[in-house]
């Protein structure tokens, strides 16, 4: 029965991938298979890295715990369903689990369901997770290309081919599902922002993705939802107040954003105003204590004080985006990230000249909203998670959006793309 289910699911996935590629715009269709293969390779590479280098780790534990849960399924369906619903059931079974954290247990449940379609094989499960991540990346790329076709190269690079984003969002890890959920939510937001009405299944998908985000990476959701709601509200208000200046629009946006953010603080205990800074500071101290000095960013004046946090926020924002620098790298993975960060630094500096024309850009509020999202998430993730290795993995939730903004405005990025295009044409000409 399991083999039949797996065969049917694989056939369905292949048909779905074929259909997605077929329905894509002709100009981006050639990038579908390379991006898919890159995600699959990344998923396998991540698994190999942990199996042969790091050893016991999240991805392997999710797999092992998923196997235990599937054994429970075949021995006692009632207890299996009870555990899926409420994390309760057979005490003897629960005591065998490594994880007790709700977010980790939620990922174990997802792993269990995927493994049912994968012969209980880690590598087949990795393919499924990588495909889920890829499809969401392709969805947001298609959506952005629909409205900004002139930014095609920046869209494809930012959402399909950034090495660190693809690597850390593929395979059996929480980020595969979390980033896919984030991309789906943002894709639907773009459709609404551009005046489209969502179909019932799109609303259903959005609700499921919001639930997945809350269960896996609630801090992504805590920033993106106020940004989305604020942007939609301001857009509607602009229809009535057409004579607002750019500065007035910014003030209106920030006022509404702060109001919604206050509501978000009630969604999770870690966001309660009375303990928010305490959580950040204690996490910072924990990472400093448990990491080698050369593997962490030090913010010596960080404390449970809003003034200190605000003063540190610009450097924390830059650090989250661009560190480790090359001279800070102490191992191969950090060096790879540092080389990538150097490219992002060049793109960022070369795109700053476009800030002068932001006030006249037709989508200026959408750009501003994206910058706010990146700034807030980068700042607080960096302060609370100063370990280089951990932050490189966590920052994928905002990195692709920031890179899209910089690559879209960078003359250096345009020059590189034109150069690669010329070289390709010459190679094709020589072969003929």
Image (tube, rainbow, N blue to C red):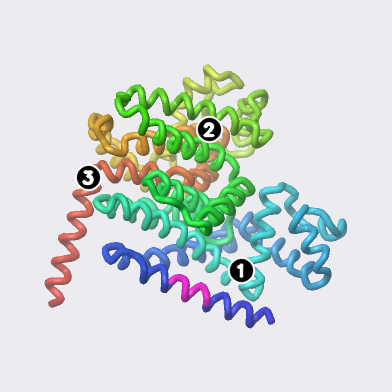
Asked if residue 187 is positioned above or below residue 358 in the image, the reply reads below
Q: Quadrant of the N terminus?
A: bottom right
Residue at x 45% of width, y 46% of height: 189
How much space separates mark 2 and mark 1, taking CA atoms? 33 Å
Residue 143 visible here: yes
Label of residue 380 in the image: 2
Q: Nearer the viewer, residue 276 or 245?
A: 245
Q: Residue furthest top?
A: 307
| The magenta stretch spans residue 16 | yes
How much space separates mark 1 and mark 3, taking CA atoms? 41 Å
Label of residue 122 in the image: 1
Q: Dot 1, crowdedness within 10 Å: few (<14), some or many (≥20)?
A: many
Q: Position of residue 106 (x, y in %)?
A: 68, 54
Q: Nearer the viewer, residue 298 or 407?
A: 407
Q: Position of residue 165 (x, y in %)?
A: 44, 52
Asked if the residue at tag 2 contacts the one at tag 3, i.e. Cβ–Cβ closer than 8 Å, the answer is: no
Q: Position of residue 62 (x, y in %)?
A: 66, 59
Q: Quadrant of the C terminus?
A: bottom left
Mark closer to the chain start, 2 or 1: 1
Q: Dot 2, crowdedness within 10 Å: few (<14), some or many (≥20)?
A: some
Residue at x 60% of width, y 30% of height: 263
Q: Nearer the viewer, residue 97 or 262?
A: 262
Asked if residue 24 is positioned above or below residue 7 in the image, the reply reads above
How much space separates mark 3 and mark 2, taking CA atoms? 30 Å
In the rendered image, which residue does mark 3 sit on?
412
């Amino acid at each position: 029965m399991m083999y039949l289910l797996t065969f049917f699911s694989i056939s369905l996935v292949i048909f779905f991938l074929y259909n997605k590629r077929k329905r894509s715009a002709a100009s981006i269709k050639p990038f579908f298979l390379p991006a898919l293969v890159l995600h699959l390779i990344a998923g396998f590479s991540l698994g190999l890295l942990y199996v042969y280098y790091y050893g016991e780790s999240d991805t392997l534990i999710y797999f092992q715990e998923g196997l235990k849960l599937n054994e429970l399924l075949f021995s006692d369906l009632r207890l299996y369903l009870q555990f899926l619903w409420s994390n309760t059931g057979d005490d003897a079974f629960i005591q065998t689990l490594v994880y007790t954290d709700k977010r980790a247990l939620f990922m174990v449940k997802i792993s269990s369901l995927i493994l049912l379609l994968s012969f209980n094989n880690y590598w087949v499960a990795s393919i499924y997770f990588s495909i889920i991540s890829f499809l969401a990346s392709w969805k947001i790329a298609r959506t952005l290309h629909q409205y900004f076709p002139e930014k095609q190269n920046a869209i494809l690079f930012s959402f399909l081919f950034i090495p660190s984003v693809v690597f850390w969002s593929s395979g059996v890890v929480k980020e595969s599902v979390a980033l896919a959920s984030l991309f789906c939510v943002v894709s639907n937001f773009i459709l609404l922002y551009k005046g489209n009405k969502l179909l019932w299944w799109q609303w259903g998908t959005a609700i499921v993705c919001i639930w997945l985000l809350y269960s896996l990476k609630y801090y992504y959701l805590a920033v993106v939802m106020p940004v989305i709601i604020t942007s939609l509200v301001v857009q509607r208000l602009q229809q009535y107040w057409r004579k607002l200046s750019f500065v007035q629009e910014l003030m209106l946006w920030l006022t509404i954003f702060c109001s919604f953010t206050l509501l978000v603080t009630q969604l999770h205990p870690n966001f309660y105003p009375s303990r928010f800074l305490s959580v950040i500071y204690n996490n910072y101290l924990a990472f400093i204590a448990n990491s080698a000095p050369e593997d962490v960013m030090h913010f010596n004046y960080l404390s449970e004080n809003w003034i200190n946090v605000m003063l540190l926020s610009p450097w924390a924002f830059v650090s989250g985006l661009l560190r480790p620098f090359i001279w800070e790298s102490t191992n191969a993975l950090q060096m790879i990230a540092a080389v990538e960060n150097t490219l992002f630094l060049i793109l960022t500096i070369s795109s700053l000249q476009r800030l002068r024309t932001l006030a006249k850009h037709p989508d200026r509020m959408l750009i501003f909203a994206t910058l706010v999202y990146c700034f807030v998430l980068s700042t607080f993730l960096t302060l609370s998670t100063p370990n280089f290795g951990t932050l490189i993995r966590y920052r994928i939730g905002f990195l692709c959006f920031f890179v899209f903004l910089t690559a879209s405005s960078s003359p250096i990025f345009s020059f590189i793309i034109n150069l690669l295009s010329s070289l390709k044409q010459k190679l094709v000409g020589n072969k003929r």
